[in-house]
Image (cartoon, rainbow, N blue to C red):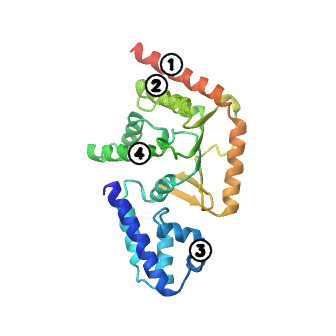
């Protein structure tokens, strides 16, 4: 499904939600209370700014007595998404976030990946899939990075563990290109990037990744991911704890200047490897 078509479908979802909510006499706030989100969320659903998760669509059907209409429509859009089910809502939220903070301990975040790096990662997880499948996954990942190109791009903060720099995903040439891309993004002030070096020893959230998102007119969210699963969290207490962990990660990391020097050094090491083979 083309990007324009998907957006049109979400706009249809929002228009139908408004059309069916108003005759019921429920305000956005009242419907929000019934489905356990804020009235502001309902307004953003109706404007197709924010996309509901499947469980919210199910509760909307119950509140409005729409016989599974919104659940079916939401499921159809999720099924046609180029992303995994558990990540589809996150990819939509990235488009409207005003501030995005990421931490990665093993893998360069998708918004910073080059096509060669993304391809190597996709192939490693899907060695028997056809080429068309691999290309679609890589293209979808590259499309996500479009949010960093506009004037309204989010404030983007990234913390990487040094392990991410030293794992030769796709080989030396691909890693040199990838790390040079990261330094270019930092040089263009599209992201503030820090690295936690090996010598830092133990650090918060050693086993995982973390994404924090802030929005103009909605509460912040946190996202964590494991094997074939993801958790999009908006409980205020949980998000505060996640934000506190991110602050500790900042404290453990090198300064942006020292981090860039380390990334550039690693890129040069990979370039030397390509020139000697």
Q: Quadrant of residue 164?
A: top right
| Placement of 269 over or under 125, stated as above or below | above
Which residue bears the numbered disc 3?
A: 36
Name the outermost residue toward the front: 151
Question: Which residue lies under the disc numbered 4?
Answer: 141
State left or right for residue 153 relative to residue 202. left
Please tell me whether mark 2 sits on a helix, a strand or a loop.
helix
State the image coordinates of residue 241 (x, y, percent, origin top left). Answer: 70, 55
Choose the circle earlier in sequence order: 2 or 4. Answer: 4
Q: Nearer the viewer, mark 1 or mark 3?
A: 3
**Residues packed near mark 3 inside 10 Å, few (<14), some (14 to 19) or many (20 plus):** few
**Taking the image as drawn, is residue 169 in sight?**
yes
Marks 3,4: beta carbons within 8 A: no
> In the rendered structure, are the residues bearing label 1 and label 2 in contact, judged by CB atoms less than 8 Å apart?
yes
Earlier-in-chain disc, 1 versus 2: 2
* In the depicted structure, whether residue 162 falls above or below residue 236: above
Q: CA distance from mark 3 to mark 4?
A: 31 Å
Q: Which mark identifies residue 268? A: 1
Q: Residue 94: where, in percent of width, then height? A: 51, 52
Marks 2/4: CA distance?
Answer: 19 Å
Q: Position of residue 26 (x, y in %)?
A: 54, 83
Who comes first in sequence, dot 1 or dot 3?
3
Q: Name the disc covering residue 176, or none.
A: 2
């Amino acid at each position: 499904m083309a990007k324009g078509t998907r957006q049109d479908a979400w706009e249809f979802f929002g228009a139908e939600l408004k059309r069916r909510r108003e005759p019921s006499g429920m305000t956005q706030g009242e419907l929000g209370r019934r489905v356990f989100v804020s009235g502001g969320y309902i307004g953003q659903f109706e404007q197709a700014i924010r996309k509901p998760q499947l469980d919210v669509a199910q509760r909307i059907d119950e509140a409005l007595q729409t016989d599974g209409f919104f659940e079916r429509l939401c499921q159809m859009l999720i099924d046609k998404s180029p992303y995994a089910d558990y990540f589809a809502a996150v990819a939509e939220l990235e488009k409207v976030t005003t501030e995005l903070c990421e931490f990665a301990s093993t893998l360069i975040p998708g918004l910073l990946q080059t096509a060669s790096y993304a391809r190597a990662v996709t192939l490693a997880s899907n060695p028997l899939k056809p080429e068309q499948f691999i290309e679609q996954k890589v293209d979808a990942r590259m499309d996500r990075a479009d949010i960093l190109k506009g004037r309204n791009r989010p404030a983007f903060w990234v913390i990487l563990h040094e392990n991410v720099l030293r794992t030769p995903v796709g080989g030396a040439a691909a890693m040199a290109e990838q790390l040079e891309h990261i330094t270019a993004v930092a040089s263009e002030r599209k992201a503030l990037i820090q690295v936690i070096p090996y010598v830092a020893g133990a650090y918060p959230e050693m086993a995982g990744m973390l994404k924090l998102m802030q929005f103009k007119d909605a509460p912040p969210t946190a996202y964590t991911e494991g094997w074939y699963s993801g958790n999009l969290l908006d409980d205020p207490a949980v998000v505060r704890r996640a934000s506190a962990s991110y602050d500790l990660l900042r404290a453990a990391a090198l300064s942006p200047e020292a981090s860039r020097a380390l990334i550039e050094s690693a890129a040069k090491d990979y370039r030397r490897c390509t020139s000697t083979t």
